[in-house]
Image (cartoon, helix red, strand yellow):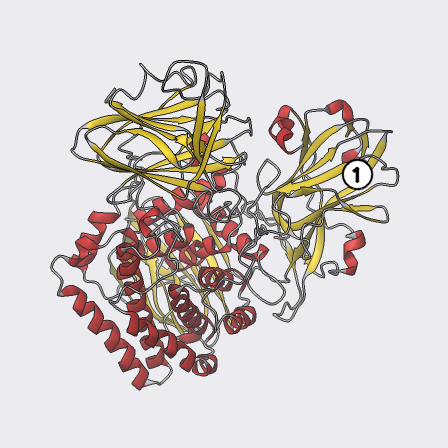
Amino acid sequence: MIHLARVFFAITFFVFYSSCIQSVHAQSSIYPLISAKKKLTENPFSPDPLINYSWDDPRASDGLESYSLQPVSWTTSTPDSFNTNEFKKTGVIAVNGKGSICFDFGQTNAGWLEFESDDLIDSVTIGISEYNEPAIVNSGALHPLKTMTPVKHGQTYRLELNPEFYEGVRFGWINVLSHQQNWHIKSLRLVCQVKPVNYQGSFSCSDSELTRIWYTGAYTVKLNLQKDYFGAILMERSDRHSWTGDAYPSQAASMVAFGNYDFVKANTINTADLNNGILSYSLYWVLSLIDYVNYTGDVEFAKRYIDNACKKLDLAYQHFGKSPKLGFYGWDERLGAGFENPDIHESQRAYSMLTIRSWAEFGRLMKQIGRADLAQKYTNYAQQKIAEERKKKNWPNEFGLHASADAINTGLTTPKEDALFYQRNYTDRVNRLSYSPFNEYFIIGAMAKMQKHKEAISAVKDCWAGQIKYGGTTFFEVYRPSWNAILDKNDAPPNNQCGYTSLTHPWSAGVVKWLSEEILGIKPLEPGFKVFEIMPHLGDTISYVNGSTPTLNGLISASFNVKSGITILEIPKGTLGKRVAIPLGGNTVKSLSLNGKPILNGEGFQIKDGYINVNNLTPGKYEYKITYKTLNKAAQVKDIPWNYPINIFRQDSLTSGNWKGSYGKEGFVLFNYLQNNKHLQKLPVYVSSVKLRNEANVHSELPADNRVLRNTTGTNRTFGAVVTKDPAPTLQTITMDVQVAGTQSHQIALYFLDWDNKERRSAVEVFDANTLKLISPVQLIKDYQNGKYLIFNYIGSIRIRINHVRGENAAVSGIFFDRHQ
């Protein structure tokens, strides 16, 4: 029934969206019902079904609780088999025959699917997914196929895919495989688990996309809060561990959104001796420790872990400049594509800069807590090594996007160096985005440090708002904006070097902290917000922003409206607003009042760089009202274009195996045509090699099959292909490196054949082989059971990455070279 999933949307029935908490029936013996109460107003920008619920006193020691959801809509291709007329009112579906019905719960949840029936005797299966087809993941998972026969408990039928039960579930299916008599589905429900936590922080602005991003990121983290630690993967695909590097942006977002500092502290302890075999993750742990102390003021905790942090920092000093084995730095092609080649120059440079940043920030913290010796040691390390970099002629020109971001984030680069970095790496809308939102967090951080907030907001919208447009209610492990052009809403995404793509990955939520610190502008200057600043950056398009950041002394709240001229601030006891910058939005000031009383010119404030700057605000509530002399005309939004050097593709589904005369006049490679692992190859003079990586080989005889590429006349057909190594973890992809001499434009045609009708769908990416920059939008190849060519023109050496989407694997049979068409 898995393969029928895509036709379920032929007939659709909608039900009133209800996120009301219902009885959990049999599950209440595992997790108690939520103890939260409905206290808050609805928030239309949040996907969280519990956004308006609050716990009285949530703590890190609390166990998981549970609640259940009804679907918001359902679809079926066999309406005669499912009578849903009474489902909305009574929760009952009458089953009258074989078929499948799909339920949409409105957002991704951490849960398990179950229903009641007292008259079921038919054979049924249940399936779940984060996207609109039943999920399949890699081998190693307890149940890679997320569809199976439910386990019966009395009259309850429950999908149990792992001992923890929960998976990432937005869509669920009931498949009726046989039908002997009519029966009834009752009380269908998604039972969801939740760690008690309250939204203490908040964010809202005139750009509703940014507001939605903040709440979606917070919800992404919330779904992955386990009983004792920050989770990493919602969908169980054999890597559901506590990943130390993932925890860095996850914890940062969690502190800003929830203020659950005791749980962040517990997770920092749990991961203190873990790095998952990845060197950078040790440094992210140090940065997590610094974040925690900056937000809480828990100096004693910092002192407790000084030795641990110093060991990590000293090991990084030993590694510096020696190209150590990194293990991993990011999924982006420019970082070695995950585990494929993580030790390339860009990753090594990025790791070196991350090291310098960690020394510098740790040295700053040590100075604040009175450890002058360690402050001097690590500050000197940072300054010494950045000085060594500067001795290299034109050193910024060697740094790509990720390494330059880590360099800028050290806080030690000069304006001239930043300008070189910016022009080299940040003006291209396509390639200033990393494949992973995890790495993009550091990129937008660097853009903010360069005071490129307008451009950073654009990148935030391209990366995170694009995921929401795709249909995401949580943020993904990897994402390309061009997916939205080839996929319908909530379609299965491409899988690739990261394996089966996770659509709920909390490492993608760092943007929550970025929005609160850079757009709203609330940042600690001393541990625990004892001293802080509020410096909002509204770009050219945001007219108001308001929100709050939780501290252990209470909420710091700020609201800025450049149209009305009203600013409202709340500063809790035990804190000092050393600097508050009130944005003017390009307007000029006539007068200013505080709490209804006029302020004399220059009294306690100054106007500079488009802000009214107020210093040393003590605890209390402040309402400033600006009367404008002149109003600035709002700027028009001007997006820079998506600039892809390869932007024109053709697909040919008619030529099939009869390629001669149409393709390959200058050369070709027929994969595994001669025998297994032996290709038939005739390369053009300008192509020195075609190198494959991560491929599996297929060779067989398919007589009289016109779909098969043929090189001779006759009826005997030798079939060959290279395929991805599904379902092995992280091997859902093949690369072809095509080494080309010269700068002339040439044509390539790739031939895809789903020879055994396994419903293959594949995605193709093209990169510059030298810079590893993406040079084309992602292409989708589907319905290629009769053979299909993908044709495009290119210049120079390229890398072609062929990714699995659905089906048994991705398969390509040949590559053909011709003159530019």
Q: Position of residue 58 (x, y in %)?
A: 63, 67
Residue type indicated by callout 1: Gly
The residue nearer to you, when weighing 406 against 807, is: 807
Q: Position of residue 269 (x, y in %)?
A: 52, 74
In this image, 749 relative to 90: left or right? left
In this image, 672 relative to 19: left or right? left
Residue 466, located in which quarter of the rendered image?
Answer: top left
Residue at 16% x, 33% y is: 742
Q: Is residue 419 visible?
A: no
Numbered label tally: 1
Judged from the image, the secondary structure of the residue bearing numbered disc 1 is loop
Image quarter of the C terminus: top left
Of all residues, the one furthest to the left in this rendering is: 393
Q: Position of residue 140 (x, y in %)?
A: 57, 52
Residue at 43% x, 64% y is: 277
In this image, 389 relative to 359: left or right? left
In this image, 330 relative to 467: left or right? left
Q: Which residue is mark 1?
A: 91
Would you call the spot at circle 1 few (<14 residues within 10 Å), some (14-19), or many (20 or more)?
some
Residue at 76% x, 37% y is: 124
Q: Is residue 377 visible?
A: yes
Residue 814, located in which quarter of the rendered image?
Answer: top left
The residue nearer to you, when weighing 156 against 468, is: 156
In the depicted structure, whether residue 666 falls above or below residue 465: above
Image quarter of the N terminus: top right
The residue nearer to you, when weighing 661 against 512, is: 661
Q: Position of residue 732 (x, y in %)?
A: 47, 42
